[in-house]
Image (cartoon, rainbow, N blue to C red):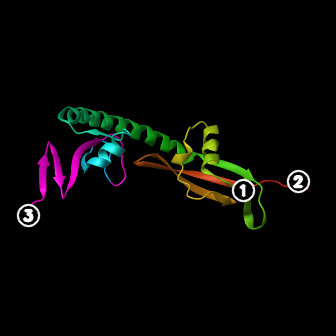
Amino acid sequence: MNLIREIRGQEIEFGVMHMEVILKEDVNKLGSRGDVVKVAEGYGRNFLLPRKLAIEATEGNKAVITQMKAAAVRRSAKEKSQAEELAKQFDTLSVSFTRKSGEHDQLFGSVTSADIAEGVAKKGINVDRRQIQLHDPLKTLGEFTVPVKLHKDVTAHLKVVIEKEAVAE
């Protein structure tokens, strides 16, 4: 038995009204930008539409979205090529820090992604700290390879060196 009916242009499935929306941004567990998805009417009207995460899927909006997808593909290709050029610069780049340390080469404090972003900026390359994929701050002396996500498909690796600060006695 089919439990789907259509009332006033909206589908009702198992007693829940559904609507089609076009996503303007990536939404976790729902879809990515430009996808046409079917969601519960309350979720669409109370969450997605007010937060400008989606627009209603009318014929006019679907035509606009196809144009936006084509533009997004061109923009993404350009951003990817720029990210690949930037990734080539990271191959030879190294960032050094001198920090105070105690026994067993443990640092007093740590080196965070913000510190690394600042060090890279001093070398002339602007990188947002959120692009630096550092799960935990670096807390020991040594050489580390830190991934930097420049684009969703391009990840560069940056060499980070933490040296011991000379102690005046």
Say which amino acid is labelled 3: Met
User: Nearer the observer, disc 3 or disc 2?
Assistant: 3
Q: Which residue is mark 3?
A: 1
Q: Nearer the viewer, residue 92 or 123?
A: 123
Q: Which residue is mark 1?
A: 109
Q: In the current view of this chain or complex, which residue is farthest to the left?
A: 1
Horizontal and vertical percent for residue 145?
Answer: 57, 56
| Chain part drawn in magenta | 1-29
Element under label 2?
Answer: loop
Say which amino acid is labelled 1: Gly
Element under label 1?
Answer: strand
Horizontal and vertical percent for residue 62?
Answer: 21, 36
Q: Which mark is residue 37?
A: none
Q: Nearer the viewer, residue 6 or 150?
A: 6
Report how far apart the C-alphas of labels 2 and 1 lie in the structure.
Answer: 19 Å
Element under label 3?
Answer: loop
User: At 20% across and 33% down in the image, what residue appears?
Assistant: 63
- On the image, which quarter does residue 120 sit in? top right
Q: Which residue is mark 2?
A: 168
User: At 44% across and 42% down in the image, what residue appears?
Assistant: 84
Q: Residues within 10 Å of mark 3 (few under 14, many from 20)?
A: few
On screen, residue 129 versus residue 84, left or right, reads right
Q: Earlier in the sequence, mark 3 or mark 2?
A: 3
Say which amino acid is labelled 2: Ala
Report how far apart the C-alphas of labels 3 and 1 lie in the structure.
Answer: 65 Å
Q: Earlier in the sequence, mark 3 or mark 1?
A: 3
Q: Tell me the quadrant of the picture where the C terminus can be found.
A: bottom right
Measured along the vertical axis of the image, is residue 11 above or below residue 24?
below
